[in-house]
Amino acid sequence: MAFAYQESGKIAVPMTNENKDRVKFGPFEADLRTHELRKNGLKLKLGGQPFEILASLLERPGELVTREHLRSKIWSADTFVDFNHGLNAAVNKLRECLNDSPDEPRYIETLPRRGYRFIAEIETPAVKLPVLPLLPVAPEEDPVHSVPRPLPTISAGRGHLSYLLASVTIIFVILAFAFWKGSKSETRETKELLQKLGHEGRGGTGAEIVRAPSIWHFDLTRPGDPDARTVVTSARDRNEAPQPSPDGKKLAFMSDRSGSLEIWTSNKDGSSLAKLTNLGSCGSPRWSPDGRWIAFDAKRGGTPAVFIVPAEGGSTIARVEDQYENVVPSWSLDSQWIYFASNRTGEDQVWKIPAQGGQAVQVTRHGGFAAIESSDGRTMYYAKTRFENPEIWQVPTQGGTESLVSPMLRPGIWANWAVTQSGILFLSSEAGESHLLEFFDFASRSVQPIGTLDRPSFWLSASRDGTSAWYTEGEQEVTNAALR
């Protein structure tokens, strides 16, 4: 801490530097130079894109920071991660760190389809205390052998004494207010911190707050039953992109619980966890219909590629790895082809490659992303774009005209729709948040409401018979037994 000294007879008072790289709000302090965030002096684990988003918002408090601005500032033009997914995930992680809620925000407000706004009050620099007269101080004495000395006399003018008393009064008021405010907030802030660190139960039941995305199951045979939605697997890290095996007994998903984002499997109840990959930055797993393989994408050597790995564990095999972006693979019904999205023509299109390896074949010509083949193998459905609220299109698997399925079928993003035998399950947007579960019926060509999730989900999958769905939600209270 810096000190300012004046001439003899004056006291040295510590001065607080108004460092423009340090921003305080609530119990938090962000150091924009070192990219560190602290809460009540405790350093939090936040870096990378989530901190960059926070820094961008703090630079323009109270103003709209558009998604486009964040993309141009934080994400490179050739990034392999889907921007919308990456941005949503980064904002969610930032909110988790701040203990903020999109429904009742204290710090970050969402402006649907436009961007975000920092709404909390940013504290002004600390008040500089006045320089006070230095009172005479007796020399240090031996507390046992010293002789009591008379108190010193202040020989000061009336104006000087008034200034001293006023200064002391100001300091006392400031310190009293700070102490009162700290004591009022200590219990709440401590409780929030303990909850975040997982040290506080609720009512002695062993329940905890899990703020990272968790995988949930939705029993669609009884959508109105509150117990139809149950947590499958949770951790203090990410668990996303759940995909059921063809026989419905297992799940594949991506998780960073091991320190890097890898592909994992488990039983349908979340038990018997197994890590299948060690590549890092893995995502979008899909089972082959014969249940033997799982396709996924991963970034290796700076470029995203499509890999496969045995469902029971084994070596990963690259199937599409070149200078282009190759992502979100899926399988043909006969397990002989792997669909994937690639920008090798300059824009996103759906391609396919033999599962055993070979030459890639272009499937769509007018834009396509995240393909899923129908249950009878005759039609390939796909999102028109990777951006928000894409249309769902279709094309015969043997080739033919690309056409819109229905204007009523508009999921919130490319990852939250799933094909079943009788229709397409999807999450539609309300105020920019994808959490309204609906069903497009192939026979009636109509959309039927199913229910509303507690919170938005980026991912959605379903069993082919349409009786079960899986999705992700964050910031949930679950029992310790569910933390697997």
Image (cartoon, rainbow, N blue to C red):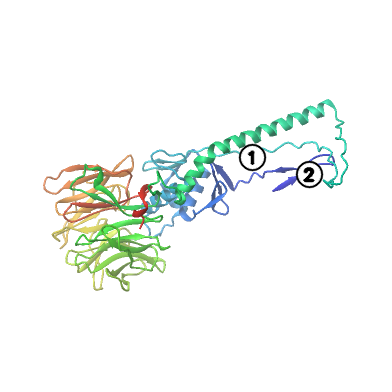
Number of numbered callouts drawn = 2
- State the residue at coordinates (41%, 69%): 301
Quadrant of the image occupied by residue 128: top right
Give how far apart the Cα atoms at labels 2 and 1 are. 19 Å
The x, y position of residue 265, in whole percent, is 30, 63
Quarter of the image where one finds residue 127: top right
Q: Does the rendering let one see residue 344?
A: no
Q: Nearer the viewer, residue 241 or 158?
A: 158
Can you give x and y, in whole percent of width and height, for residue 149 in the image?
A: 88, 38
Q: Which mark is residue 126?
A: 1
On screen, residue 450 above or below 169? below
Few, some or many C-alpha atoms within 10 Å of disc 2 (few <14, some 14-19, many ≥20)? Answer: few
**Secondary structure at numbered mark 2:** loop
Residue of label 2: 5
In-image side of 26 versus 75 (left or right): right
- How far from the left and from the top, in percent, is residue 254? 34, 60
Q: Which residue is most to the front?
A: 144
Q: Is mark 1 on a helix, strand or loop?
A: loop
Does residue 14 lie above or below 74 as drawn?
above
Kind of residue indicated by mark 1: Ala
Can residue 471 be seen here? Answer: yes
**For the residue carrying disc 1, how many other residues have a C-alpha within 10 Å: few (<14), some (14-19), or many (20+)?**
few
Q: Residue 26 or 281: which is nearer the viewer?
A: 26
Q: Quadrant of the C terminus?
A: bottom left
